[in-house]
Image (spheres, rainbow, N blue to C red):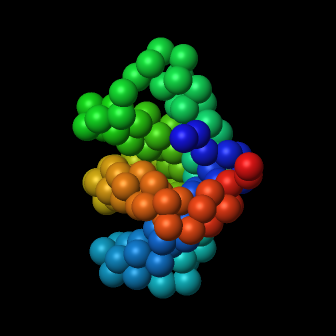
């Protein structure tokens, strides 16, 4: 059962909201930067990622459908790598600017962030895709902000 645009926005908002809650204290502790600075840069990255999340997943769904790709570990890994790779290209300059770092320092920090987000992305979408049919079976399609 395909996901509507409204559900994709809901899914992306859940993904980013949980990421902010997990990352802000973790990254502030790791970097020694102020909690509020890390919260702001994390939130800005998440807003950026929210838009990317919706667009990327809609495009990925179309490719999956068009080429008959089957959901499995290899496709989930490709999904996570492609999703995070796109964010690196835009996120590194933002991190460098906000935290007054060089592009190399920001890239290294972002690669550290990637080590968190690769498994997080994989686990989040696996969990969502696992729970989704159960919620729909129990509460109906409207339980996940889908349209009829």
Q: Nearer the viewer, residue 114 or 51?
A: 51
Q: Nearer the viewer, residue 94 or 44?
A: 44
Q: Nearer the viewer, residue 76 or 95?
A: 76
- Quarter of the picture containing the N terminus is top right
Q: Nearer the viewer, residue 142 or 101?
A: 142
Q: Is residue 98 above or below residue 117?
A: below
The furthest residue to the left:
73
Task: Residue 61: tell me if it is visible.
Answer: yes
**How far across and how far down the image is residue 130, in percent?**
37, 55
Q: How many marks do you count on the picture?
A: 0
Q: Is residue 122 above or below residue 26?
A: above
Q: In the drawing, does residue 68 fall left or right of residue 8? A: left
Q: Is residue 77 above or below residue 91?
A: above
The furthest residue to the top:
67
**How far across and how far down the image is residue 70, in percent?**
36, 27
Q: In the drawing, does residue 97 fall left or right of residue 107? A: right
**How far across and how far down the image is residue 80, in percent?**
38, 42
> What residue sits 33% from the left and 81% below the top?
29
> What residue sits 47% from the left and 15% below the top?
67
Q: In the drawing, does residue 15 fall left or right of residue 129? A: right
> What residue sits 30% from the left and 74% below the top?
30
Task: Residue 90: tell me if it is visible.
Answer: no
Which corner quadrant of the image does residue 105 belong to?
bottom left
**How far across and how far down the image is residue 35, in percent?**
48, 84
> What residue sits 68% from the left and 54% below the top?
146
Which corner quadrant of the image does residue 55 belong to?
top right
């Amino acid at each position: 059962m395909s996901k509507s645009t409204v559900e994709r926005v809901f899914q992306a908002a859940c993904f980013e909201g949980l990421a902010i809650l997990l990352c802000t204290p973790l990254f502030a502790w790791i970097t020694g930067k102020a909690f509020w600075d890390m919260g702001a840069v994390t939130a800005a990255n998440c807003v950026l990622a929210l838009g990317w999340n919706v667009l990327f997943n809609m495009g990925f769904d179309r490719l999956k459908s068009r080429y008959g790709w089957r959901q499995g570990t290899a496709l989930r890994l490709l999904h996570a790598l492609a999703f995070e790779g796109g964010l690196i290209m835009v996120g590194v300059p933002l991190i460098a600017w906000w935290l007054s770092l060089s592009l190399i320092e920001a890239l290294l920090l972002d690669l550290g962030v990637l080590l968190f987000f690769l498994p997080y992305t994989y686990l989040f979408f696996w969990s969502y895709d696992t729970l989704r049919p159960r919620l729909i079976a129990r509460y109906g399609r409207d339980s996940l902000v889908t349209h009829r």
